[in-house]
Amino acid sequence: MRKYLSFFRLRFSMGLQYRAAAAAGIVTQFAWGGMEILVYRAFYRADAAAFPMTMQQVSAYIWLQQAFLALFMSWMMENEIFDGIRNGNVVYELCRPVDLYAMWFSRSMANRLSKAVLRCFPILLIAAILPDPYGMGLPVSVSAAGLFLVGMTLGLIVTVAFCMLVYGFTFFTISPDGLRIFCVSAVELLAGEILPLPFFPDGLRRIVELLPFASMQNVPLRIYSGNISGTEAIRAVGLQAFWAAALILAGRAVLNKACSRMTIQGG
């Protein structure tokens, strides 16, 4: 375990060095979040009763989404891993006395967390001082705050575990581009990145909420905003835990299968 914590610390420290990129990201994410909220506000002024979330809930959802963009965005996969698989440099990783899955998993989590730490606080601070319904307040209750933190942790694990599954399948392709584009497109639509899941038609929403994509950012952001609470929130967090375990087991199986079939050429 100590060696994987070392990988985590090294990648986390490396990610904290990119402060200029973080500053640019803060400006971009604040501008994008503000634009999204203004678009929703225009629709809500027409008929607020027609929407499944209140405007205040939507604002909280969007600001949290922008603040923690690095934690859940599917397109933030590591090019270093893809390049290593494609050019064969992954064999150097296999020579190390470490578990390849655990090493990549810890590095991926550290990479996402370091980016989120640099960007989240300014966005949350500005969102907290904006007037209603454009800003975001505190969680609706102490229990909601606790479930939010648990949901955030599980959502990050599900996101990283899904990316690990993509890395594993990359071993069986000539180029990772097609697989990566397909997976990113599916996650952006089904995880609530483009549109919060409550805005989906009821029949489709019930199906989508059972998929692993909904266990990424959808659950913690809706818990914080108060869109789901009580038994429904606990059930959603339980489903997150299930998908976290299932994706980790599936990712390990795919990666082990790929490594067992790998052929290394050269002297």
Image (tube, rainbow, N blue to C red):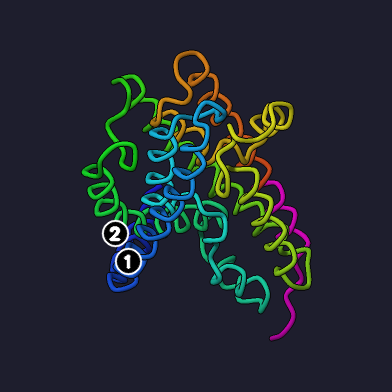
Q: Is residue 60 above or below residue 162?
A: above
Rendered residue at 36%/50% (across/down): 67
Quick check: 129 left or right of 64?
left
Give the amino acid at mark 1.
Answer: Ala
Residue at the spot of label 1: 22
Q: Position of residue 258 (x, y in %)?
A: 73, 59
Proximity of marks 1 and 2: CB atoms separated by less than 8 Å: yes
Check disc 2: other Cα within 10 Å, few if <14, some if 14-19, many if 20+: many
Q: Which picture quadrant has residue 21?
A: bottom left
Rendered residue at 74%/72% (across/down): 175
Q: What separation in Å lies between label 1 and label 2 (alpha carbons)?
A: 6 Å
Residue at the spot of label 2: 118
Q: Is residue 233 above or below residue 3?
A: above
The local secondary structure at tag 1 comes to helix
| In front of the other: 161 or 222 | 222
- Residue 170 covered by magenta stretch: no
Question: Sequence order check: which comes first, mark 1 or mark 2?
Answer: 1
